[in-house]
Image (cartoon, rainbow, N blue to C red):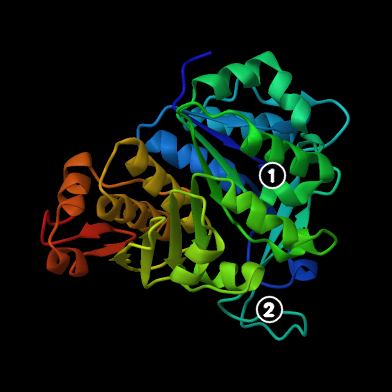
Amino acid sequence: MTTVEAVCLGESMAVLLPDRPGPLEAVDGFRSRVGGAESNVACALAGLGVPTAWLSRVGADGFGRRLLAELTAHGVDTSAVALDPLRPTGLYVKEVGSHGPHPRDLGPGQSRLHYYRAGSAAAALGPELLAEPAAATLLAGARLLHLSGITAALSDSCLALVRALLAAPRAERLVSFDLNWRPALWQHRDPAVLPALLDAADLVLLGADEADAALGTGDPQALRALLPSPATVVVKEAGRQASAIGPDGQQVSEPALRVEVVEPTGAGDAFAAGYLAGTLRGLAQRRRLRLGHLAAATALTSPGDQGALPPPKLVAALLEATDAQWAATRVGPAGVQSPVGGGR
C-alpha cells in the first residue's frame, strides 16, 4: 500500500448511458460507465498530482470489478475498498431528452438520473470501517479526508460513519465536506442533520443553489454565519464566481471562466479537486479558486465526468494571470485559448 496524501470516502456506482436521446422506454441500448462524486474527486486529485485513495465498498460483481479497475487506471489507490459478497454495486441510469413526440420525453437539453442504490454495498458502510487495518492506515497517513452529504444520506450506518470520522482526532489532517445535495436521497431521511455535519468540517464546499434548497440560503455571508466553525467556507455560484469566506467573514471571490459546455456532470467534483489540490499545495485563496475553476472547466468540456487539465506551464500561467487575462480566457472542447499562453 502506497502512502497517500488524500482519502476520498463515499459510494461510486455503475452508470448506464443511453445510446440515443428519448424516454427510457424508447431506448434500445446503453453504454456502461462508472461514476460517483467522491471517486470523481479522487480521480481528479490524482490527475492533479496528489496521491489519492478512494475508500468504500462495492459488490463482488462485474460492475464492482470494473469500477475498481477504472479508478486504479486513473492512479487512485483502491487497496482498502471492501468487496461485499451479498450486496450489489449501486447503479444509476441517465435519461436524456430529445425533440421527439413521445409524451414522456423530457425535452431537448434536459436530463434526469435514475438511481438504483438502495441496499447497495456502499450503504452498508459503518463506523466499524475505522477499525479495519487497511482503512485505518490510509486515514492515519492522509493530509486530507474528503466527505460529502451523499454518504450521510445513504443509510443510518453511513451517517454514523460520517459522524465518527468528523469526531475522530485529526492531528494535522484536514477534513473537507462537500454538501452535494441530492433531494431524492433525503426523501425518507432528515436533512436537519446536515448543518451540524458541515460545521464539524475544516473546509466546506457548497453550491449556492443547493445550499438554498438544503439550508435555506445561498448567500455566502449568510452561509458563513450558519457555519461558524470551519476554517473556510467555499460557495460556488454556478457560471458566475466562487467565493472563499474565512471565520472573520473576509471574502475572496474569483469569477468563473467562460466555457463552451459539453456535459455538466462532474464539474462540481472537479472544482472541489482543484480547490483541494491548491489547498494542499499551500496556494493563496485566489489561486485555489482559480485552480478549482480551471479543473471544473475541463470537466465541463469533456463528454465524461473527467477532464484533462492543460499543460502545467499553461496552468501555472493562468494561476498568475491578471484579472483581464483571466477574463479573456476561453475553454472549449478544443482546449484553452488565453492571452497568457495561447492554446493547447
Q: Write down the residue under mark 1.
A: 14
Residue bearing the label numbered 2: 106
Between 270 and 138, the one lying in front of the other is: 138
Tell me which residue sits at (59%, 52%) in the image. 198
Looking at the rendered structure, the kind of residue marked 2 is Leu
As helix, strand or loop, the secondary structure at mark 1 comes to strand
- The answer to which image quadrant residue 80 occupies is top right
Q: Is residue 180 visible?
A: yes
* Label 1 environment density (alpha carbons within 10 Å; few <14, some 14–19, many ≥20): many
Which residue is at the front of the view, 341 or 243? 243
- The correct choice, above or below, for 190 with respect to 197 in the image is below
**Quarter location, residue 286:** bottom left
Which label sits on residue 303?
A: none
Few, some or many residues within 10 Å of mark 2 (<14, 14–19, 20+): some
Q: Is residue 42 above or below residue 150?
A: above
Considering the numbered disc 2 on the image, is that residue within a helix, a strand or a loop? loop
Q: Residue at x 13, y 69 (%)?
A: 324
